[in-house]
Amino acid sequence: MANSISADDVKRDAQSAANEARSDLNEGARKVREDVRDTVDNLSENSGADRLAQRGAEIANDAVEAGRNYAGRARETGQEYADRARMEAERLYGAGQQKAHEAAIYAEERYDEVSEMVRRNPAQSLGIAAGVGFLVGLLIARR
């Protein structure tokens, strides 16, 4: 059970991945902003609008590519966490099924033992049942 992953762990990991993606996007936007500012500052008047337009297109392409990369990473991370959550749910379901099966076997064995005891000692069983019934009646009557 050392490898079990709780829903809180999955949520915490997903939040961490989202925060990391947000931080990376902010950093990318800051770099793009700085590149645009540097480009505008470095362009001289006689280099013209063509160089500015070309540099702007390059920056825009870089930003689009960075956005695609981050979206792909977020999608992969989300799928990974969904798969981990599904595997954990399946493991828990299997463990629950196993425990239910064990409880059913235990109850069946105890039922067989009690049935056998009642068959061997019917008078004693009847006396015990009457005593238990009397005690339950007393407890209920006091309320």
Image: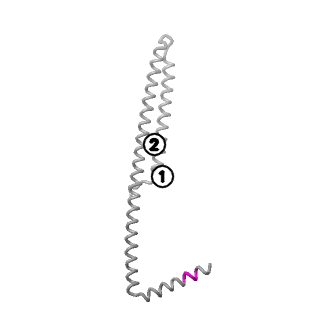
Q: Earlier in the sequence, mark 2 or mark 1?
A: 1
- 94 inside magenta stretch: no
Taking the spot 48% from the left edge, 29% from the top edge, the residue there is 31
Q: CA distance from mark 2 to mark 1?
A: 14 Å
Residue ID for mark 2: 17
Write down the region rendered in magenta. 135-139
Residue furthest to the right in view is: 143
Taking the spot 42% from the left edge, 42% from the top edge, the residue there is 77
Tell me residue 22's x, y (percent): 49, 37
Q: Nearer the viewer, residue 121 or 102?
A: 121
Residue ID for mark 1: 8
Q: Nearer the viewer, residue 64 or 30?
A: 64
Going by the numbered disc 1, the residue's amino acid type is: Asp
Within 10 angstroms of label 2, few (less than 14), some, or many (20 or more) residues?
some
Disc 2 element: helix
Tell me residue 52's x, y (percent): 48, 17
Going by the numbered disc 2, the residue's amino acid type is: Ala
Majority secondary structure of the magenta segment? helix
Within 10 angstroms of label 1, few (less than 14), some, or many (20 or more) residues?
few
Q: Is residue 74 above or below residue 57?
A: below
